[in-house]
Image (cartoon, helix red, strand yellow):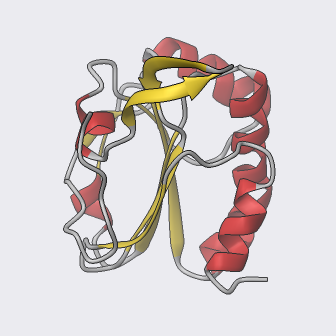
Amino acid sequence: MTERLSPGDIAPDFTLPDADGNEVSLADLRGKRVIVYFYPAASTPGCTKQACDFRDSLDRLASEGFAVLGVSPDKPAKLVKFRDQQSLTFPLLSDEDKSVLSAYGAYGEKKLYGKTVVGVIRSTFVIDPAGKVELAQYAVKATGHVAKLRRDLGLD
């Protein structure tokens, strides 16, 4: 099991390819607050609901100075299809080797339908402008999570 991050920790830097194969680095977003959310698989019902909730909240989040990055172990080609089908307007990043997922404690043992399995732990992090973890939420629900996050951030 990888260690979980807590508020005040330095957010692990990463550079990952987006759906189009362009590299996106967390370090390039210094000076902004960044929401990084990890999800198990593109085009599944829960992940689609969560991504669409972020899409629908993006204008409000951006107006408050937040950038949003979605990260999954999916290949870029699958991310392109997901992005285009759902009209997603924020970067979806591919972490095929799960190294970033692991660095954030978002990959490991979890309960799935009563069984313990190893996989992506649906998690969301808010990174402050200096690159520190402001908020770390693990095992979040796909439905209603973005609304709860907005409340937690004082945006509603």
Instruction: Return the x and y of residue 43 as percentages of the image width and height.
Output: 70, 20
Instruction: Return the x and y of residue 150 as percentages of the image width and height.
Output: 70, 73
Instruction: Return the x and y of residue 18 as percentages of the image width and height.
Output: 42, 33
For residue 135, above or below residue 124: below
Residue at x 68% of width, y 19% of height:
113
Residue in the foreground of this view, choosing between 113 and 64: 113
Residue at x 48% of width, y 36% of height:
121
Visible residue check, residue 19? no
Residue at x 27% of width, y 35% of height:
102
Q: Is residue 22 left or right of residue 50?
A: left
Residue in the foreground of this view, choosing between 114 and 66: 114
Instruction: Return the x and y of residue 99 as percentages of the image width and height.
Output: 23, 30
For residue 35, above or below residue 72: below
Visible residue check, residue 105? yes
Farthest front residue in view: 114
Residue at x 61% of width, y 82% of height:
64
Which image quarter holds the C terminus?
A: bottom right
Please identify the quarter of the rendering in which residue 133 is found: bottom left
Which image quarter holds the N terminus?
A: top left
Please identify the quarter of the rendering in which residue 47 is found: top right
- Number of marks in the rendered image: 0
For residue 139, above or below residue 137: above
Q: Is residue 134 left or right of residue 26?
A: right
Q: Is residue 119 left or right of residue 149?
A: left
For residue 19, above or below residue 57: above
